[in-house]
Each structure stands twice: as C-alpha cells, then as structure tokens.
Image: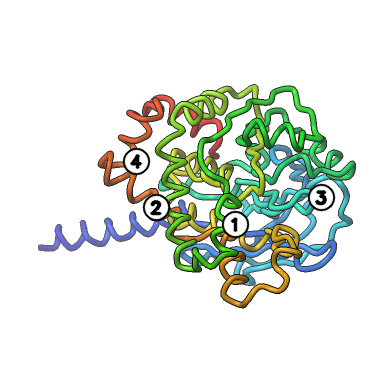
Amino acid sequence: MLKKLLFLVLALLLFSYCTREKPDIRVVCEVTRWGYYRIKWETFPPMEGTVKIFMSNVPDSFNRYSPIAEVEISKGFKDVFLVQTTKRSYFNLVFDKKYSVITAERNIPMQGLFNFRDLGGYYNSNGKQTCWGKLYRSSSLSRATYQDTRVLRNLGIRTVLDFRTKIERNTAPSRFPTPNTYYLPLRGNPPDVFLDKILSNKMKLGDVKVLAQGVVSFLLENNSDYFIKMFDVLLDENNYPVLLECLFGSERSAIAAALILAALGVDMDQIVNDYILSNKYLPFDTLINSDVFFGQDEGVQETLTALVRVHKGSITYSFDKIIKDYGTLDNYFNKCLNLTPEKREKLKEILLY
C-alpha cells in the first residue's frame, strides 16, 4: 500500500514537472491606434516571472540583447509604441527566460489592397505555430498603389498563387510583379452572377446563405488539379514568402487558406475564425455598387450585403461534406489532392515552428 502511495505521489510530481516544463502559451497582437501595439498573452498553467519582448522587422531574426519591454507575466498584456513605416513589425516574447513565442499583427494595413493578412500564429494539434511572414492572403493585386507595392517588396513576396480567372486577370492586371506567379483559376461562379436574381426579389437572404454553402463546396470538389499544383508550389522552400490572391481575398484564396491550415493540423475552430475574419476587413461600402444599392428596399439591401460577406456555415458545411465523402480529412488530402503523409510532414517542417 505504501509503495502504491509513493508511486502515486511521484507520478503527480512528475506530471506537475512536465506541465511546468511545457506550458501552453497563447499570444496575440493588435493595433489599438496609430503606432500602438497591444500584445496579450495567456499561459496554461499560469506562470510566474517576467516576459521580455523583442522587436524586429523580419520574423526569424531578433536582437535578444535589447528588449523593448519587460513586464510581469501575470499582467497579461503590454502596450508598445513604434513609429510605423512600410516595414512590418514582429515581436518575440520570451517567458521566464525559457519559452519563446513570435507574434505580429495579423491584418496588414494597405492603401488600395484590402483583407491583406498574414497566416502566421495559428496552432496545430501538437502545439506548433504557423510561421509568421511566410504565407499571406489578399484581395486582387490590381488594386495595389505605389505605397502598397513598397510594403509588398519589404515583405519579400516571392511567389503569388493567383486564383482569378483569365478574364479577371485581363480586366484587372496585377500591379506587383513577382519572380514566380502561378495562375490557378479555380472553377466556380463568382457571387455577382446572382445579382439580377437578388434585385428582382427572386433570391432572399436565406437563399444567399444556402447558395454560399454550395459555392464553397463546389470549389473544393471541382478544383483538385489546381489544389494539387498549389501544394506542389508550397512544398518548395525556395518559393517563400507566398501570397494567395483572388478578387476580394475572401472567396477562393480563403478556401485555399483553409485547406492549407487543415493540412498543417490546425483545428476547425481556428480555420473558421480565419475564414470569417474577412467580414472585419472587407470594405462593404465599396464592394456594393452604390448605384445598385441605393433605392432598394431593406430586404434587398440585406441580401446584397450577405452576398459579399462570408458565412460560417459555408466553410463548416463544406468540410463536413468532405469528411462524409472521404471518411476523414486525411483521406481527402491523400486520395484527392495527392498530399501524402510524407508530403504533409514536409509542409509542416516548412510552415510550422
């Protein structure tokens, strides 16, 4: 009995030690006003000690001798001021002199481009984090101003995966040349195809939400060849940083981003959150033609707005359908996208830390 009791005590001590050695640390960064960043963190279990914050304009190199701040971990946040330039700011937080986490602002403000985001900072099932500064998603680069191109150059964008159709590309050519551009015109109807039906009251708000499920599901089911090519590009380390581009940055590049995060083992909650984040950064006042919007009754206006928004049900329905059809996401990646377990491991080596 005594031996069992001692074994239990030792097991509890060992569990406590392991937990202490490998805390779960989650960090987010947001801009509160011009030049001010609020960096917030949580640790599980709660940690004692201090956190040192270092800053750099590149995501993989920090001067660890000169922290810009040092605060108690228990405070949970720190506001820092930096003069903003066309260069991006990354922050490295070192907790209790042991545990290092990198963070940055997810949305990158631009003049002409919108919904431009970094896909870094998401956690997979093994607690690894998607790398900052390697994978971005954006609206059409045809909207880029001179100032935007300076930001893009500073980000070092090397490869663009352009999911727009040939007609879209010819009508609105990119304003930012890159060493590598791959044209992957995903098959599927753009939302404005249904504009006339909405204006004639043949399509209501609920119809649009159901339609959105079908649009996303169709994209996933009918573009395997393009998604295979996308992953082939992503499996080449020489192609990074990579930018995913479509018209609004909320439809085709959003589906591509969701697939990539899923392949990296990121859970569905984070994938959904990234998907619907477009609603925060889409400029609805410019996406909906004011001449079309003006004078319509309230129901039509709500339906038009829903047409350019993204909906949680679209992405969850589509992934649920994949699982129903293939049994698991692993089977879908392996059988449909030729993304074998070996290839997924290589992708994780490139895009996780």
Query: In this orientation, which residue lies closer to the viewer: 145 or 59?
Result: 145
Which residue is identified by label 4? 329
Task: Measure the C-alpha gap from mark 3 to mark 2.
Answer: 49 Å
Q: Which of pointers 4 and 2 indicates the residue nearer the eye?
A: 4
**Which circle's residue, 4 or 2, is located before the other in the chain?**
2
Residue under label 2: 18
Closest to the camera, between mark 4 and mark 3, is: 3
The image position of residue 231, as x and y in percent, is 51, 28
Q: Dot 3: few (<14), some (14–19), or many (≥20) neighbours within 10 Å?
A: some
Q: Please state which of the two labelled residues, at mark 1 or mark 2, is closer to the viewer.
A: 1
> Is 20 displayed left or right of 287 in the figure?
left
Q: Do the residues labelled 1 and 2 touch (CB within 8 Å)?
A: no
Q: Is residue 27 in view? A: no
The residue that label 3 is drawn on is 112
Crowd tier of the residue under label 4, counting other residues whose Cα lies within 10 Å: few below 14, some 14–19, many 20 or above: some
Position in image of residue 292 (x %, y %) = 70, 63
